[in-house]
Image (cartoon, rainbow, N blue to C red):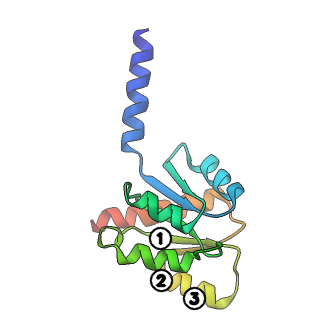
């Protein structure tokens, strides 16, 4: 019984200290894949729409946001604009994840966001890129 308490306390401390990654994508399979690939290193928050993302951001500020560009009702571009208008969210890094491979999307995504990742992507590559962005953010904070 005593070991159970120690493990539970360890788990709580681990979760309290984990960096939060918000995944915003209308494809539940993408959200699931990212959660499965990152859950041991990060606390994962997920939203299946831009509007749901904005609602969650009213109560939780993640350390980084992975944002799909092509979503119904509110695109990733519009979601990005709304996030950046909020002073408390302006410094949260945003990485665009998308199936769009056209030059305009790449240029805009790379210019506006902190990174641009094309689907499909390797989860290890995603981890490395998230790590680099968070390390860079932590050294400038």
Q: Secondary structure at mark 3?
A: helix
Based on the displayed image, in which of its 4 quarters is residue 12 positioned? top left
> Which residue is rendered at x = 53% and y = 82% of the image?
110
Can you tell which quarter of the image residue 87 is in? bottom left
Q: Are marks 2 and 1 in contact (CB under 8 Å)?
A: yes
Residue 139, horizontal then vertical, whole percent: 31, 64
Residue 53: percent from left, percent from top: 50, 63
Residue drawn at point x = 41 percent, y = 51 percent: 19
Query: How many callouts does the rendering have?
Result: 3
Decide which of tag 3 and tag 2 comes sooner along the chain.
Answer: 3
User: Pointers 1 and 3 in contact (CB under 8 A)?
Assistant: no
User: Badge 1 local density, few (<14 within 10 Å), some, or many (20+)?
Assistant: many
Q: Residue 75, how many percent across, how many down?
A: 59, 77
Q: Which residue is mark 1?
A: 94
Mark earlier in primary sequence (1, 3): 1
**The C terminus: image quadrant:** bottom left
Q: Residue furthest top?
A: 1
The residue tagged 3 is: 107
Name the quadrant of the N terminus. top left
Residue 112: assigned label: 2
Spatial separation of the CA atoms under disc 2 and disc 1: 9 Å
Could you tell me which secondary element the residue under label 2 belongs to? helix
């Amino acid at each position: 019984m005593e070991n159970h308490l120690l493990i539970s306390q360890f788990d709580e401390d681990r979760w309290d200290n984990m960096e939060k990654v918000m995944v915003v994508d209308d494809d539940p399979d993408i959200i699931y894949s990212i959660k499965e690939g990152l859950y041991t290193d990060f606390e994962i928050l997920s939203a299946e729409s831009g509007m749901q993302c904005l609602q969650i951001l009213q109560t939780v500020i993640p350390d980084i946001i992975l944002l799909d560009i092509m979503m119904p009702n509110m695109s990733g571009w519009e979601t990005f604009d709304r996030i950046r208008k909020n002073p408390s969210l302006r410094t949260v890094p945003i990485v665009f994840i998308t199936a769009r491979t056209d030059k305009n999307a790449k240029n805009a995504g790379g210019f506006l966001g902190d990174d641009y990742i094309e689907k499909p992507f390797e989860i290890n590559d995603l981890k490395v890129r998230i790590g680099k962005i968070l390390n860079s953010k932590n050294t400038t904070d």
